[in-house]
Amino acid sequence: MLKVSGLTSHYGRIQALYGIDLEVHEGELVVLVGGNGAGKTTLLRTISGVQPMTGGSIEFKGRDMGQMSADARVMYGIAQVPEGRQMFGPLSVEDNLCLGAFTRRMRGLDTDLEKMYAMFPILKTKRKDPAGTLSGGQQQMLAIARALMARPKLLLLDEPSMGLAPNLVREIFGTILELKAEGTTIFLVEQNAFAALSIADRGYVLETGRIVLSDSGAALLDNDRVKQAYLGL
């Protein structure tokens, strides 16, 4: 579904990504782990079109995405849940959800809203409340639901467990597994390497803008380098 080849990206003169090669196949849950500053968010932003690429290629379902705008990529089926939730705080929960369906011109809006409320019942309870008044865990649920309103073929998740209590982390990861079981293809970026690799079909390890390891999730969990650097073992 997604093929990234030789991808580079810069912030001015500073190079952030160095020749990234990776693939995400339809129906997979693929995880990218790495430390702070490794370039994980930059990679997701480049795939979704928010950050410019300076070399290489991005193909989605066989189509070159390199010069396509971010909104066009959403229309073709790529939706990102950004790091830090990035709610429209003064707007209601329901308005935030509706904005997720904007590129679809709101077709099937009521059906999709009910689906999101069934997945995250607390959002229905608080649907008229300003999004900025939600707790961190509730905002993360809203961020995921907002992205799903675009009916994505590929869901990009950037650090969904950041800042959440352990019980909420388990809930969010449970939701990710439910989405995978329903057939959603997921590319997950996470610092919680153990939790992420435990549910991954495959994984990549990113260090200073370079992919240094790739294997199945189980194999990476058992890799001595990953254990030492990311699992504290």
Image (tube, rainbow, N blue to C red):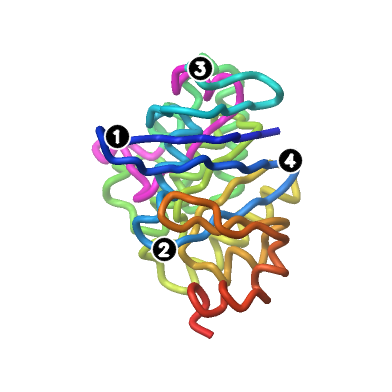
Q: Which residue is mark 4?
A: 25
**Tag 1: Cα neighbours inside 10 Å, few (<14), some, or many (≥20)?**
some
**Tag 2: Cα neighbours inside 10 Å, few (<14), some, or many (≥20)?**
some
Q: In the depicted view, which residue is nearer to us: 185 or 115?
A: 185
Instruction: Find out whether the residues at labels 3 and 2 contact each other: C-beta distance under 8 Å.
Output: no
Which badge, 2 or 4, is on the more N-terminal residue?
A: 4
Three-letter code for the amino acid on which mark 2 is drawn: Gly
Query: Closer to the observer: label 2 or label 4?
Result: 2
Three-letter code for the amino acid on which mark 3 is drawn: Ala
Q: Work out which residue is located at the far bottom of the displayed protein and give it.
A: 233
Disc 2 secondary structure class: loop
Distance, label 3 to label 2, CA atoms, is 31 Å
Distance, label 4 to label 3, CA atoms, is 21 Å
Distance, label 2 to label 4, CA atoms, is 25 Å
- Tell me if residue 81 can be seen: no
Residue 143 in picture, x, y percent from top left:
44, 44
